[in-house]
Amino acid sequence: MSEQLPAPDFDAQNYARPNQNWICGHACEGNACRPGPDQKGNCCATAECKPVLKIKPGETKGRWVCTRTGGECESGPLPDGSCCNPIPKCSPVPTLRVWRGRVTLAVIAAACAVLLVVLGNPPWRNNFISPGIVSSPHSGAAFAALALTNRLNQSCGACHVAGNSGPNEMVSVALHAEPGILDLKKLVFAKAAGPTAIDEACLKCHAGKNVHQPDAPQISCSFCHVEHQGIKIAATMDANCNFCHGNAAKMPAAIGGKPFALVHHFADDHPQFRFLTEKLRDPDTLKFNHALHLTGTTIPNLPGGSKLDCVFCHSPDAAGAFMKPVAFEKNCRVCHSLQFDPATPELQLPHGSAEFVSAYLRSLPKQYLDLAAKQNVADGNNFVQQKLADLRTQFGSGEDLEKRIFFSTATTAPEINVGNVSGVTRAIFPGCAYCHEVKSIGGLPEITKPIQTEHWLVQAKFNHAAHANIACTQCHDAVHSKDTADILLPPKETCVTCHSPRGGVADTCAECHTYHKLPVAAQ
Amino acid sequence: MKRFRRQLAFGLFALIAATVGALWLNGKSNTLPNYAYLTGWALLAGMFVLTIYNVRKKLPFLPLGKSETWLQIHIYLGFFTTLLFLIHLNFRAPHGWFEVVLAWLFVLVSGSGMVGLFFSRVLPRRLATRGGEVIFEKIPALRHALKTEVEKLSLGADAKSLVIAEFYTKRLAPFFSGPKNFWNHLAESRREVSALLAELEDLRRFANDMEKEKIERLGALVRQKDGLDYHRALQLALRLWLFVHIPLTYGLLIFTALHIILVFGFSGGAR
């Protein structure tokens, strides 16, 4: 008990009350009054004492006595019983604690006011509560038109039920959400990546949700696609893919009888490309030798003297992602002439159709006659007869000539300079079968149309332009390929050189793979 | 001291263990369903415990454990909830207006708490090195007493010194009129008071013996006033950070409540 008594030097007059909300206005002058302000900040100062009326035995009036602490004052109480030393009133000062409370109340009021104003105004509300920019497929005029077609709200309400309503309904939707706000059990033990209520909104436009190939089990759209991350919809992360593709329990042991590889990282456990493991061959029937064209000593230089290289035949498309198909007129004719008469370079066979070639050969007298007219030959008929006689001497009958032109693979034709190619080439047309597969169907020639496969990995993304700083032969082993059936794509190891943590180039799944099911036409 | 070290070691161990655990769980975020919801609820629970520390201080009579223990929990949990906050955000800055405001409120509350922790560790030591203990609430009265004495010395009936009176009017009166040099004291700079004392010292050249005694005494009073200002600045700093920390905590709680409503109203269970 004694410990609670004030210390001997305790200054009762100037007692500070730091825990109270108000302090005496005279405290800053060192003259705080003893009672101090009340809890509401009112000054309680009255007088230095409250005189007491003492009535001695036999007296009727009595006498007022000073009760001041520290001894009676000299003047004593006034005749009416009031103290003669009134304490001047002050304006109590709020303590820092009170100011802090006021600031706190102001912040609470400001927060509530801002939220009420913003949430009460629908256009502001949607902008304010949106957690980020909606991706371009789900916003803008095109999406609004689509939403209108599907009788959906054209704003937040197109996907969110709560987006159709005001603050009260928003709270109601939240309280009835599935899983509920306090449904911690469902939140904790929910099926990972399982379908959610928001998926129903996706299905309004993406009916069937069979967008993952090959028709993956029920996975929530939002498991892979997180919205409100910017104009471009956020790329699917490896972790999303690995959730199934890296988990033996989730993937079937085999698809089509083949074991299904579990993949975590491209550089580590991604399987080798299937065209290599399954030893796939290019079905193209064109006879083409890449090695010869790139390294052969018999290959002449191109017009201008440059050496034949990859880019002469393979030029990128407008987007730069893939290569345009090779075309005879643009890429082959410069060396491979269709001249069939050694003495008449002006006449060349048409390219592209066996029927056209046959028709052309049967109209040779007319072709020679036209040539005679062009060259102002006086006796055109004699010119034609002479040319035809030369052909017969060299190739035999017209039938023999046609057979040779279609089916010959001769490589021993005379070599002369063709066009503006630097050096000699096999100028004389050796025969369609030199490059093409030519079949005889009922005695008529049929040329198998070449197949130029534009995309080998149809579900993969690739951009040649992004790889422009790499030599073609670094990925495509063309200099060693003598057979058209060789698929000149690089093995996985070549890609890993760069596309790996060590190579420093992105190696995510989505970097190469598209995972949505292809449209029926593309399949 | 031994007990403090034990508490510090235990607190740091718990913080590091919780941090490692949270980061490990974060690495497995894609295998855990509703990961954002779980981190969100954990964050809210942390914020709740942090907030009721203020309630605990207002109810000292309830047997709710020592305030010192609560403070330790408040500090370590504060650091942990900051980490949880970053995990909840997936270590990415939010984009929407509402989420940006919510994130900034958290950052300000958390940041002011760290500033407060820094002040409470550093400023008391600095105060102990500068004069005796001064009760913050009594500083105005002490300053008034010093001002009265300086006035008496400079302008009183027995002052009789024009030089000192002029100096008082020009330099001492503004200095003693109220608290001065708040930022200088926080930055531990004595430039202003040193300049004033130097000017006071210069007066000696024009002073007689009696005036020199007064100048000596005035110098002592200036140093005392500067000491008071120093105590006031540092003690005020020890209190002012709470003007950010506590009010914004309530703002944060209001926005958090709306955040929960929006999440459950709009996400429909999506991640």
Image (tube, rainbow, N blue to C red):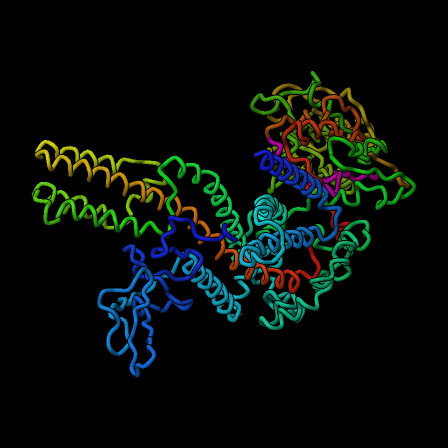
For the residue pair A119 and A485, the one nearer the viewer reads as A119
Q: Position of residue B2 (x, y in %)?
A: 59, 33
Residue A317 shown left or right of residue A37 in the figure: right
Magenta extent = A446-468
Residue A201 shown left or right of residue A12 in the figure: right
Q: Position of residue B31 (x, y in %)?
A: 75, 46
Q: Is residue A176 above or below residue B213?
A: below
Name of the residue lying farthest toward the top? A297
Q: Position of residue B121 (x, y in %)?
A: 48, 39
The image quadrant that residue B10 belongs to is top right
A13 inside magenta stretch: no
The image quadrant that residue B175 belongs to is top left
Q: Is residue A288 above or below residue A24?
A: above
Q: Residue at x 60, y 58 (%)?
A: B62
Answer yes or no: is residue B239 visible.
yes
Answer yes or no: is residue A398 visible.
no
For the residue pair B196 and A81, the one nearer the viewer reads as A81
Name of the residue lying farthest toward the right? A257
Q: Is residue B267 above or below residue A455?
A: below
For the residue pair A174 and A445, the one nearer the viewer reads as A174
Q: Taken as a whole, is the magenta stretch helix, strand or loop?
A: loop
For the residue pair B19 and A98, the one nearer the viewer reads as A98
Q: How many marks?
A: 0
Q: Residue at x 68, y 46 (%)?
A: A236
Q: Is residue A420 above or below residue B237?
A: above
A451 inside magenta stretch: yes
Name of the residue lying farthest toward the bottom? A60
Q: Position of residue B19 (x, y in %)?
A: 65, 40
The image quadrant that residue A138 belongs to is bottom right
Q: Residue at x 41, y 57 (%)?
A: A17
